[in-house]
């Protein structure tokens, strides 16, 4: 049995892993899918102090409160920023890092350094908080969910994300321990053209770059494949082509 902690991306919540979590639990694994402060069912906690550091603390609190060790820690999209910060601060608790079509930052980078500049064009200030990814501005097509029922479900769950999280650089303090943790990148084929080839080269050379031909919200559009790859990743077994 493995222990999984699944961290969602921008504007999402733990709800987005519902299908993947069901499959993993049915296979006997322990699964935690926390929702970050200010999002999902925790949107009522949104405020001007919500930033990347707080989201890292959210996940660290789950690890500590639930006494989790030997964790397979996965982050989707913006969640890649969060899980990198978590692994930097608590490497002794992490067995394997998985990036689900996610940001793979280095020290001093913010997600705005890695993400499309168009993000900035869609911000709004609400109650003194600058927000992005409003569901009524058509965010779900950006996330690659094309099935009408799934798209409606996703749109009904999305909550605006604090832009401060995108601007804040990730400051790493334990890079040697972080880099010693085995990593796997699971990417969407359609997004490969927009990624830095140099960042993918190491994972590709090690056979740890796995592709799924689907949209960005791969945990919703291809939950069986994602769950299968998550189960294979810590065993260092490459998935079938």
Image: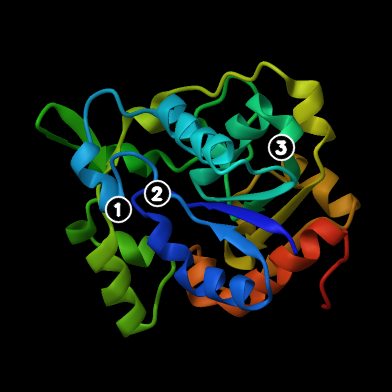
Label 3 vs 2, first from the N-terminus = 2
* Residue marked by disc 2: 35
Q: CA gap, disc 2 to disc 1?
A: 7 Å
Question: Could you say which quadrant of the image residue 36 lies in?
Answer: top left
Viewer-proximal residue among 157 and 144: 157
User: Which image quarter is the N terminus in?
Assistant: bottom right
Q: Secondary structure at mark 2?
A: loop
Q: Secondary structure at mark 1?
A: helix
- Residue 5: x %, y % from top left: 59, 51
Rendered location of residue 158, percent (x, y) = 28, 58
Q: Nearer the viewer, residue 94 or 16?
A: 94
| Left or right: residue 104 compared with residue 170 | right
- Return the residue at label 3: 93
Of the two numbered discs 2 and 1 on the same chain, state the one appearing first in sequence. Answer: 2
Label 3 packing within 10 angstroms: few (<14), some (14-19), many (20+): some
Q: How is the image coloured?
A: rainbow
Label 1 near label 2: C-beta < 8 Å? Answer: yes
Residue pictured at 31% horizontal, 83% vertical: 148
- The label nearer to you, 3 versus 2, is 3
Q: Residue 204: x percent and y percent?
A: 83, 53
Q: Tell me, yes or no, if residue 3 can be seen here.
A: yes
Residue 143 can be seen in this image: no
* Label 2 neighbour load within 10 Å: few <14, some 14-19, many 20+: many
Q: Secondary structure at mark 3?
A: helix
Indicate the position of residue 179 as horizontal and vertical percent values.
80, 31
Residue receiving disc 1: 40
Q: Say the numbered circle drawn on residue 225.
A: none
Q: Residues within 10 Å of mark 1 (few under 14, many from 20)?
A: many
């Amino acid at each position: 049995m493995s222990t999984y902690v699944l961290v969602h991306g921008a504007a999402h919540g733990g709800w987005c892993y519902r299908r993947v979590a069901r499959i993993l639990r049915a296979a006997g694994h322990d699964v935690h899918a926390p929702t970050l402060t200010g999002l999902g069912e925790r949107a009522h906690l949104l405020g001007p102090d919500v930033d990347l550091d707080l989201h890292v603390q959210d996940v660290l609190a789950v690890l500590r409160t639930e006494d989790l060790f030997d964790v397979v820690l996965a982050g989707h999209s913006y969640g890649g920023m969060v899980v990198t910060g978590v692994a930097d601060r608590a490497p002794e608790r992490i067995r394997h890092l998985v990036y689900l079509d996610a940001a793979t930052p280095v020290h001093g980078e913010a997600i705005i350094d890695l993400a499309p500049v168009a993000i900035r064009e869609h911000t709004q200030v609400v109650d003194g908080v600058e927000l992005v990814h409003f569901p009524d501005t058509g965010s779900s097509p950006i996330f690659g969910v094309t099935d009408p029922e799934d798209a409606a479900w996703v749109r009904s769950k999305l909550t605006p994300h604090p832009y401060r999280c995108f601007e804040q650089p990730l400051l790493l303090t334990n890079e040697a321990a972080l880099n010693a943790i085995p990593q796997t990148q699971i990417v969407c084929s359609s997004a490969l053209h927009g990624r830095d080839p140099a960042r993918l080269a190491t994972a590709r050379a090690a056979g740890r770059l796995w592709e799924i031909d689907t949209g960005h919200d791969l945990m919703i559009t291809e939950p069986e494949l994602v769950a299968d790859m998550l189960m294979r990743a810590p065993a260092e077994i490459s998935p079938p082509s």
